[in-house]
Amino acid sequence: MRVFWSGVGFGAGIASTVMVKRRVRRTVNRYAPSEVRTAVSARGSDVVDRAKRVTTEIRAAADEGLKAMRVRRQELDDEFVLPSEIAVKDVRITRISNR
């Protein structure tokens, strides 16, 4: 559940970044000289590009973590016998006598 809400928060952050970038670009285009417009537009594009790059890196890290988790789980499953895997014939019942 934490991963879900982290993803929702991250998505909302990216969406708000894009919305702010568009609003700033419109405002700058309306009021600023052309040199300033170019500089602000380029800087806004850099921010979005960085955000996309970070998103890709986070996805790659999450995939790598899930893969490592699955490998470790398999190692543990191979090392230990789960109660559901014990056959009835392997269980020896001993009677405890009351003295």
Image (spheres, grey):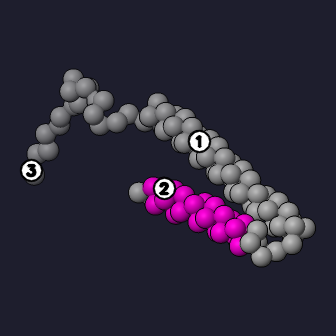
For badge 2, the amino acid type reads: Val
For badge 3, the amino acid type reads: Asn
| Quarter of the image where one finds residue 11 | bottom right
Q: Which residue in the structure is indicated by mark 3? A: 98
Q: Relative to 61, say whether 26 is above or below.
A: below
Secondary structure predominantly adopted by residues drawn in magenta: helix
Is residue 26 in the magenta section? Answer: yes
Q: Are marks 1 and 3 in contact (CB under 8 Å)?
A: no
Q: Earlier in the sequence, mark 1 or mark 3?
A: 1
Q: In this orientation, does residue 84 appear?
A: yes
Span highlighted in magenta in the image: 3-27
Q: Relative to 28, say whether 46 is above or below.
A: above
In front of the other: 88 or 55: 55
Image point (76%, 68%), residue name? 29
In front of the other: 54 or 79: 54
Image point (64%, 43%), residue name? 60
**Most distant residue in the right direction:** 35
Image point (57%, 60%), residue name? 15
Q: Earlier in the sequence, mark 2 or mark 3?
A: 2
Q: Which residue in the structure is indicated by mark 2? A: 3
Q: Please rate how many residues cluster around mark 2, counting C-alpha atoms within 10 Å: few if below 14, some from 14 to 19, many from 20.
A: few
Q: Which residue in the structure is indicated by mark 1? A: 63
Q: Relative to 99, say whether 33 is above or below.
A: below
SS state under label 3? loop
SS state under label 1? helix
Give the Cα distance between marks 1 and 3: 57 Å
In front of the other: 90 or 10: 10
Give the Cα distance between marks 2 and 3: 54 Å
**Quarter of the image with the N terminus in it:** bottom left
For badge 1, the amino acid type reads: Asp
Provide residue 74's location: percent of width, then percent of height. Answer: 49, 33
Q: Please rate how many residues cluster around mark 3, counting C-alpha atoms within 10 Å: few if below 14, some from 14 to 19, many from 20.
A: few
